[in-house]
Each structure stands twice: as C-alpha cells, then as structure tokens.
Image (cartoon, grey):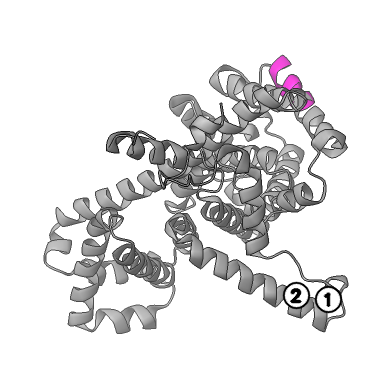
Amino acid sequence: MKPRPVGGRALDRVLGRACDARVWAYQSAAVRIGMAGVWLLLLVHEFWRRERIWGPDAPWSWRLAEHSLDRSHAFSVLRWSGGELWFEVFYVLSAAVAVALLLGWRTRTASLLFLVSVLSLDHRNENVLNAGDTIFRITAVYLVFTRCAQVWSLDARRRGRAPDPGDDRTGVVLWAVCGLVLAWATLLALLTGGWALLLWGCWAGQAVWRGVRGRPGVRRTLELIGHLLHNGAVAMMMIQLCLLYGSAGWYKIQGAPWQDGTAVYWSAGLDWLEPYPALSHALSSHALTVLALTYGTVLVQVAFPFSLLDRRVKNVLLALLFAEHIGIGLLLGLPYFSLSMIVADLVFLPTGFLVAAGERVAGLRRRLAAGSGGTDGGRPAPDARGAEAGLAARSEEHTEPHSEEGEGVTPSWRGSY
C-alpha cells in the first residue's frame, strides 16, 4: 500500500476529529448541566424580587426597556405583552425550561427555549446581573448548536431504551405546540426579522430530521453535519473564553493599580462589593498577599490561552482560575458571575476527569437508592463507561478500524460517504 503524505494524514486526523460524535461529549454535557443549574438557581433566588427586577412595574420601566431594545435591536419575548400574567407565565416557563435542560429532556428544543429565556430576561433589564449575563448569553447561543445530551441526560437514557424514534408522540406534540406559538407570534407581528427566520428555521429543521429517518443516506449526512456543528460550537466556546481571559489580562496590564500591585486592595474596599467586610479587611491588611493576588491574576489570565499547548500546565492554570472565581464570588459578592465563569471553564476539563466524576456521582446515587430502598437499589445504573460505549456504537458507522499495515484510522469524513 502506498503510504499517504504526512500532510494528508494530518488532514485526515483533523477532519476525523471534527466529524467524530464522541469529541467533547462530556464537556458539553457538563456545561449544559452547569449553566441550566446556575440559571435555575438565579430564577429561584430572585423569585420574591422578580417583579422589581423584570416585571411590568419594575424601576427600569417598560418605556426605558423598549427604548433600549429599539436602539440595540435586541430580542425579548417579554416585549410581546406588558401584562402581569404574561410575565408570570413566562417566568415559570423559564424555570421549567432550565429544569428540562438540566435533566437533558428534549434537549434540542430545551436548549433553544433556554436561549430565548436568557435573552428575554437579560434584555428586559441589563443592569442587574453584574456581567454574568454576558457569559449566560454566549454559552446559551453555543449550546443550541452542540449535542450536549449525548451523556448524562434523559435523552441518552431514552435512546438507549428505544433506539427507534418512530413512535415519539411527546416529541411530535412538543414540536406542534412550538409551531402554534410561532405562528401566533408571527401573525400578530410580534416576531419579525432575523429572529423569525432563525426560530422558524429551527422548527422546520426538526420536521426535516423526522422526515428523513427512513432514508439512511440523507440521515447519515445530517448526522455528519450535526457532528461538525457540535464540535465547531464547542471549539468556538473555547476560543471565546481564551479571548475573554487574554483581553482581560492585557487590559489589566495597562491599568496603574494593576501595575503597582494594589488593584485587589482597592477592589476589596468597595462598599457596594463587600458582602463580608471582615474578610475583605483581613485580606487587604496583608500587603504581600494583595501584591501576589494582583500580579497572579494578571499572569494567569494572560498565560491561560497559551497554556492550551500543554495539558498539564492548562490543568494547573484552570484550577487557579477556579480559585480566582471563587474568591471573586466571596469577596466581591458576585456569585452568579463567578458560577457562570466556572461552569463555562468546565469545557476545558479533561475527558478522563469528567468520566471519573460521572462514575462517582452514579455510584453515590446507587448507594443512596440502595440505602433508601429505592427501585434502583437492585440493579446498577448505567455509568459513564456505558455511556461512552453508546457513543462509540453510534459513531461506529463513521469510523473504520486500524489497518493491518499500521496506516492508522480511516478518517470518519471519508467513511461517511
């Protein structure tokens, strides 16, 4: 057999990874669970203050909100009606969508509705989430394009029990209800422009996906496109975070408080960002600690994008970033910003670590079920290895085995066609 050129083998590896269904399955699932959980926590925590923050009679009035939306051309479902009932129903549905995405139930629809929920509430009042709203928006957009329910989801469990999606009445009903809502909003001119095209396109895409299940060739092509979108969205999420950390670090370098090592001292002394004054004062009273934290923050943020070239260095800096965000949440009283950043950073965690964490959680759940006499106590629940085996089986049609001559794996983009 004639050996392939080095450049050709490298291209095969790149395309094979881009078309592999198993790449970043656990990372996207971790981000999905984390973002949905943090958003649900936010909605529950602010439930008693929801009307003062996002309601029709909030200090940030509807007139101010509409002026801001007209100027930015942003999207908000809350704009469809200024009534109290509409707001209350939407708020409850937003919490329900967060639960559905957290559990991985009908994730393709839930991820899109989650994006609508985040954008609608954030654009209603952009002055309340202390920069955490930016991370929510960015991550919610990318989650729509990922296959974040391949593991650790009810969708994955349902596919394992009933691989044939032919008798999916729940999915058909959900698709029909979404179509009716879109038709109502379009006919009343509440939904226009690019958002109308996007939402109707996603709705029509679900119909096309269901219509081609009897045509294996077309379905395999759509599967391949789905793999490319998934891997591309996760890669863009990583690039976005690298740009965020890199730009934040370089902007800090240009500031005088960061250059002389006093930035952490001044941040800890802000009255409106001081939930625990005793802790802030104890920190700011140690000059060497303040100096180390100030310079260390800049160093870690500037170095993190480059650390992706070495896995061990990346893992060390990732742990330092987690510690930094925990410190910001405690010292500056920005819990949702810190939690959203920590969850977004989960996309950089190694697959082995996430698999081991999933196995530990599954083992703990089985022990709790056995101790409480639950129905799952007598049978082992599928762990992360079982889910990984399912991923391998689903992507087996796109990958061929190693050749006996040692030429490597036939790239999945070739085997797909």
Give the left or right position of residue 213, taking residue 127 as reference: right
Residue 341 x, y percent position in the rendering: 44, 57
**Residue 146 sits in quarter:** top right
**Residue 260 sits in quarter:** bottom left
Q: Residues within 10 Å of mark 1 (few under 14, many from 20)?
A: some
**Residue 267 colored in magenta in the image:** no
Residue at the spot 70% in from the left edge and 55% down from the top edge? 103
Q: Where is mark 2, residue-wise? A: 366
Residue 56 visible in the snapshot: no
Residue 296 position (above or below residue 60)? below
Residue at the spot 40% in from the left edge and 67% down from the top edge? 322
Name which of mark 2 and mark 1 comes first in the sequence: 2
Callout 2–callout 1 Cβ contact below 8 Å:
yes
Q: Where is mark 1, residue-wise? A: 377
Q: Secondary structure at mark 2?
A: helix
Give, as a single range, the part of the protein colored magenta.
Answer: 180-188
Give the left or right position of residue 118, taking residue 282 as reference: right
Residue at the spot 59% in from the left edge and 19% down from the top edge? 197
The three-letter code of the residue at mark 1 reads Gly
Q: Secondary structure at mark 1?
A: helix
